[in-house]
Amino acid sequence: MSDPEQIRQRLLHVQARIATAALVAGRRAEDVTLVAVSKTHPPEAIRAAYEVGQRDFGENYAQELAKKREALADLRDLRWHFIGALQSNKAKLLVPGCAMVHAIDRTSGAEALGKRAVANGITIDVLLEVNVGGEETKAGVAYEEAPERAREIAAIPGVRLRGLMSIPPPTEEEQTARAAFQRLRTMRDSLRATMPSIELLSMGMSGDYPWAIAEGATHVRVGTAIFGERLGR
Ligand SMILES: *Cc1c(COP(=O)(O)O)cnc(C)c1O
């Protein structure tokens, strides 16, 4: 694992870049939540980030999340975000014990989470994953289908649809990256007109989070820039 001091330094650097990007965009840094993506990294790496104030962590395998949650149960105010593709039979690993599920791309996944939430007397916050990259990527619902899927998911008991999420194809071109983020924001704005709970935008990763913030991201999901290269599983 990267040594704890290195993780802390990288985290401070990412926090500073978030603050700058927010400032330049005329936004408040507090309105951008940094989700530190800890997949493949051990609980000690998460602890190192926690010690310098990081509270939101993202994982994309339900079992891995559940294992780390157990190992870090003493950190009571840590918030887990599930950012991977959801298999319905894994809902029990995520509810309760997960603050938000970012990548809902089918109604059945949301229904499985909703059932667990109702049984536990809670609600679970979810985001609808939208494909803004067109042909190049397959994850997420097609852009044109997003309104219909959003209405279906918003009607599921136990689930609160809070916003949209996307993983645009990686690019080093600012204009291309920002155009994809803009598409997601445009969809969010249009849905919010009739569904006011749809406020959040989870977009931006290590390579592009300052651009995502410029386009209105409320959650950026940053892994490599904090924890270093991913380890073998
Ligand atoms: C791994 C992952 C990230 C983080 O990617 P980095 O490039 O390491 O910052 C963000 N979002 C999702 C959905 C991921 O799976």
Image (tube, helix red, strand yellow):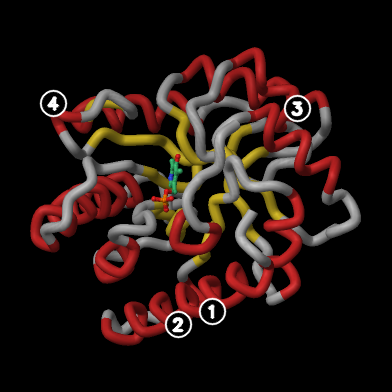
Q: Quadrant of residue 217?
A: bottom left
Pointers 3 and 4 in contact (C-beta within 8 Å): no
In percent of width and height, residue 127 lies at: 47, 40
- The amino acid on which the numbered mark 4 sits, given as a three-letter code, is Glu
Q: Secondary structure at mark 1?
A: helix
Q: In the figure, is residue 200 to the left or right of 49?
A: left
What residue is rendered at 23% in x and 53% in y? 181
Q: CA distance from mark 1 to mark 2?
A: 6 Å
Residue under label 2, please give it: 16
Q: Nearer the viewer, residue 124 or 221?
A: 221
Label 3, label 1: how far apart the Cα atoms are: 38 Å
- Say which label, 1 or 4, has the lower sequence index: 1
Residue type at tag 1: Leu
Q: Is residue 179 above or below residue 60?
A: below
Which residue lies under the disc numbered 3?
A: 118
* Marks 3 and 4, how far apart at CA: 37 Å
In front here: 152 or 139?
139
> Residue 135, which numbered label?
4
Few, some or many C-alpha atoms within 10 Å of disc 2 (few <14, some 14-19, many ≥20)? Answer: few
The residue located at (62%, 53%) in the rendering is 57
Tag 4 near tag 2, CB within 8 Å: no
- Please say if the residues under marks 1 and 2 sit with CB atoms less than 8 Å apart: yes
* Residue 161 image offset from top left, x and y in percent: 50, 40
Q: Residue at x 14, y 31 (%)?
A: 134
Q: Nearer the viewer, mark 3 or mark 1?
A: 1
Q: Secondary structure at mark 3?
A: helix
**Which residue sits furthest right?**
74
Task: From the image, tell me which residue sits under label 1.
Answer: 12
Lower sequence index among marks 4 and 2 = 2
